[in-house]
C-alpha cells in the first residue's frame, strides 16, 4: 500500500473521534496535542486513547 501523501510537511487532522470514554474526546473532537497510531489485528487504532476513568493525573 502506497502512502497517500509523501510530503513531509503534510499534517493530517483527526476529523471525528468515536471513543467517547477517552479523556481527549470533547464532543467527538480529539484534543490531544498529537496522536500515535498502532495496528491491532491488521487495523489502525489510536494508541493515544486514555480512559477518562483510569486517568489519575
Image (cartoon, rainbow, N blue to C red):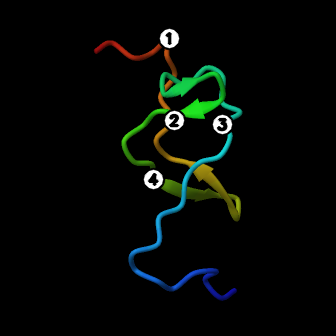
Q: What separation in Å lies between label 4 and label 3 (alpha carbons)?
A: 14 Å
- Disc 4, disc 3: CB below 8 Å? no
Quick one: label 3 or label 2, which is nearer the N terminus?
3
Asked if residue 14 lies left or right of residue 55, the reply is right
**In the picture shown, does residue 26 fall above or below 10?**
above
Image quarter hosting the C terminus: top left
Q: Which residue is mark 4?
A: 36
Check disc 2 and report its element: helix, strand or loop.
Answer: loop
Nearer mark to the viewer, of 4 and 3: 3
Q: Which residue is mark 3?
A: 17
Residue shown at 56%/26% (left/top)? 25
Residue 49 is tagged as 2
Asked if residue 17 lies left or right of residue 52, the reply is right
Nearer mark to the viewer, of 1 and 3: 3
Quick one: label 4 or label 3, which is nearer the N terminus?
3
Residue 53 is tagged as 1
Q: Position of residue 43 (x, y in %)?
A: 70, 60
**In the picture shown, does residue 52 fall above or below 22?**
above
Amino acid at each position: 500500500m502506497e502512502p497517500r501523501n509523501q510530503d513531509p510537511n503534510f499534517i493530517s487532522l483527526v476529523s471525528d473521534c468515536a471513543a467517547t470514554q477517552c479523556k481527549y474526546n470533547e464532543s467527538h473532537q480529539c484534543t490531544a496535542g498529537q496522536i500515535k497510531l498502532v495496528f491491532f489485528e491488521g487495523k489502525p487504532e489510536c494508541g493515544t486513547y486514555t480512559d477518562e476513568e483510569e486517568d489519575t493525573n
